[in-house]
Amino acid sequence: MEKQEGFMRALKCRECGREYPLTATHVCEFDFGPLEVVYDYDRIRKAMTRSTIERRPESMWRYRELLPVASEPTVGLQVGFTPLIRADRLAKRLGIRELWIKNDTVNYPSLSFKDRVVSVALSRARELGFNTVACASTGNLANSVAANAASAGLKAYVFIPHDLEQGKILNSLIYGANVIGIKGHYDEVNRLCAEIAGKFGWAFVNVNMRPYYAEGSKSMAYEIVEQLGWQIPPHTVVPMASGSLLTKIHKGYQELVKLGLASNGECHVHGAQATGCAPIAHAQKAGLDFFKPVKPNTIAKSLAIGTPADGFYALKVMKETSAAADDVTDDEIREAMRLLAETEGIFTETAGGVTVGVAKKLIASGKIPADSSAVLCITGNGLKTLDAVDGHVGAPREIKPSLREFESLVANEVKTVSA
Ligand SMILES: *Cc1c(COP(=O)(O)O)cnc(C)c1O
Ligand SMILES: [Zn+2]
């Protein structure tokens, strides 16, 4: 009865388990539960071994059997396989034995982890015959949809809160996308987009295409495991907006175990939010299974979702993996951005500051033990949120083009240092 496409079997309701055909749809008709892609793991197990994967080009598509496209992907073929950096200097500052940075600040082409989800969503949208794509975004998704749609010759509409960082706005406009600024916060943008998606026959990557789109996040987990020599890290710290990335990193780890590509072991997937928008972290800390929606107020605008679509499932994953969540203030976010830059030479956007700041807290409190090893997911590039650090990192000292002036500047510096 179901038509198998590639290695996908069907869409399936996460609540009641009812199955649906693999079309552009995202909620169950019976209970409004979210739909998720299910795969034929027996066939995948035969098609995918460590060595077949390792022989493929270094992009997220080396795990293509586990990504929801029916045939070869057509959009974002170079996305992913970002560096996993051993961060000894930061480890020392945070007080942990071993630390790794999964560096999606340099993801191709739009410098955030969103290229992973968009590459999948647009490849699938094309398979389903769409030529206009759209999204509701906190910034990075808009950048990625605009960039990837341009390279694929698709028409794009991106909807954003009107008061986003200038860097994020320009980074959508430059690609020629239709950029619509909504006078409201993300949750209002999202609600409007749900209405628009119902009326216009477009592929909304995070509305009607969400089951496919969200699966792209799993590639971050596969890469981490392969880059660690096919080991699942005992601790992973993940920033949360809707909570989707956290749930999909966990799903990615589990799939590799199921396929025999990695062995089962200690695996805690911790969540990070900004204090100014921490519905999931607050619920986790209070031991609740449900979050209470909030009105966001934080410099971490890419994470500013007050009613997180996958918050419930993110809480479930943290509970199941005995993980923790925490949140950090705007000042702590800036401090953590600076710490990462000064110790490892990586300039992250505010979301990365949230991850590093929360990791620091979790290590200090022993929730991530000092003698253990952790991976921090750094998901976006600092050049897009310059406003957040402007005025907080000092300024160049200016002199005339004269050697004498420079010598006296250095002399003064030596005096201050030795004083
Ligand atoms: C979108 C985003 C996230 C997290 O997104 P989820 O909605 O939780 O999957 C994390 N970091 C950055 C930089 C983002 O843009
Ligand atoms: Zn259902």
Image (cartoon, rainbow, N blue to C red):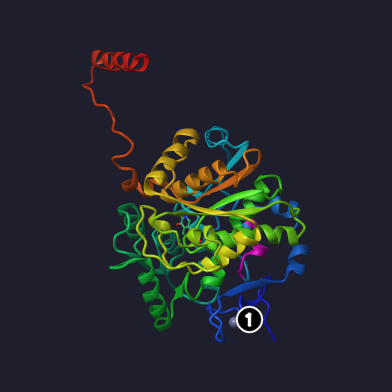
Find out if the beta carbon at label 1 lies less than 8 Å from the nearest ligand 2 atom: yes
Count how many numbered circles sit on residues in the image.
1
Q: Is residue 73 visible?
A: no
Q: Position of residue 160 (x, y in %)?
A: 35, 65
Q: Position of residue 332 (x, y in %)?
A: 41, 44
- Residue 308 lies in the magenta-colored region: no
Element at label 1: loop
- Residue 67 lies in the magenta-colored region: yes
Q: Quadrant of residue 124?
A: bottom right
Q: Position of residue 386 (x, y in %)?
A: 34, 46
Whether residue 394 is situated above or below residue 257 in the rendered picture: above
Specify the principal SS of the magenta part.
Answer: helix
In this image, 63 relative to 177: left or right?
right
Name the residue nearer the viewer: 118 or 365: 365
User: Magenta segment, which residues?
Assistant: 62-69
In this image, 164 relative to 401: left or right?
right
Q: Is residue 37 visible?
A: yes
Which residue, given by chain and number where applicable, does mark 1 sit on?
16
Q: Quadrant of residue 42?
A: bottom right
In this image, 260 relative to 123: left or right?
right
Which quadrant would the C terminus be assigned to in this image? top left
Question: Outermost residue toward the front?
Answer: 286
